Image (cartoon, rainbow, N blue to C red):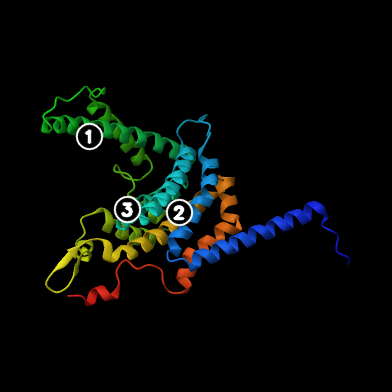
Amino acid sequence: MTKVPAGADGQARSQADTEAESALLADVSGVLRSERTLWRATERIVSLSAPHVDEVCLGVPLTAGFDVHIVSRTVVRRAHDALAAITAAVNSPAQASARVHLRAMAEDLFFVKWLIGLDEAVATEYVRQRARVEALQAIKAQQEFLPLAYRQLNTDAPDLGFRDVSEELKQARDELADLYQAQGWGRRGPSVKKMAETGDLLPEYEFFYHLSSKSVHANLHEMARMAWGADSTVNISSNPFGGVHADLANVYGTWLFDKILETVADRFESIQTLMGCQEYGVWLALILVGAARQGRLPLMIHPEELRIR
């Protein structure tokens, strides 16, 4: 059968696709030859996804108020902000701090997958009641601390502009507990671990909670890593494991970012478009698949550390 000519428009599109693929190939080749491949590839993910995240998060109508749909959008924005923060931290003297952002990304993944699996009316009631409790908790916490802080600084505390919320907070907590009880979650509600388990993400919970806890809590293994030197003297610094911290943040930050997008993709056409585009797939494969095929997914702890006195 004779091939039907594509026509001028078809030729133009084909040429544009070819040029785009050539530009992508050249960019990938440059990143692979660079000294900071994972960081540069993660930056490409952040830049590429930014307009798609904006499409999800800008100009959003509030016709239904604060509900599960708005929460899903906030999770997309928070994930993008966190990955951007990771790349900024990795490109700074404070590389070790980059891993801190993995905690919020992991919790958001477990939370949003659990939340969108609920009946929509229950989910909306939950987010509204929980948001009210958390806002009141913030008011009470600052009412208790800031006057003390002003006194310690030998200054009179100003009027913060809030009434006493103790009774309102108690009532809001009781109402939220009643909602929990009615759903069979117990009066304290589901834990993050239970949310992860419900979403079939328990191995991810165990790994990412331990990994992120090492950076947000007082952790003696991390402190011991900072004491590095000869037998008689050491220098206290995060620098000896700077590359380890950077790789953990880049690779697993990208992993969590992709999992969050995958979880909410069927709600947002722009996220589906992003995840289906060639460029996104190439950078994702470079960061994750490439490392996996080489057996080089970043480790939390290395065998060499166990041989050090």
Instruction: Judge the density around disc 1: few (<14), some (14-19), many (≥20) Cα neighbours within 10 Å.
Output: few
| Residue 75 image offset from top left, x and y in percent | 44, 45
Instruction: Judge the density around disc 2: few (<14), some (14-19), many (≥20) Cα neighbours within 10 Å.
Output: many
Depicted 145 relative to depicted 279: above or below: above
What is the CA distance from the residue labelled 3 to the residue labelled 2? 14 Å
* Circle on res. 100: 3
Mark nearer the viewer, 1 or 2: 2
The residue located at (45%, 54%) in the rendering is 257
Does dot 2 land on a helix, a strand or a loop?
Answer: helix
The residue located at (18%, 64%) in the rendering is 235
Q: Outermost residue, right direction?
A: 2
- Which image quarter holds the C terminus? bottom left
Q: Nearer the viewer, residue 285 or 21?
A: 21
Does dot 1 land on a helix, a strand or a loop?
Answer: helix
* Circle on res. 141: 1
What is the CA distance from the residue labelled 1 to the residue labelled 2? 31 Å
Q: Outermost residue, bottom direction?
A: 307
Q: Amino acid at mark 2?
A: Phe
Quarter of the figure with residue 96: bottom left
| Residue 117 image offset from top left, x and y in percent | 47, 48
Q: Nearer the viewer, residue 151 or 192?
A: 151
Q: Earlier in the sequence, mark 1 or mark 2?
A: 1
- Which image quarter holds the N terminus? bottom right
Q: How many marks?
A: 3
Does dot 3 land on a helix, a strand or a loop?
Answer: helix
Q: Earlier in the sequence, mark 1 or mark 3?
A: 3
Mark nearer the viewer, 1 or 3: 3
Residue 139 left/right relative to 296:
left
Quarter of the figure with residue 25: bottom right
Q: Which residue is mark 2?
A: 257
Depicted 62 relative to depicted 228: above or below: above
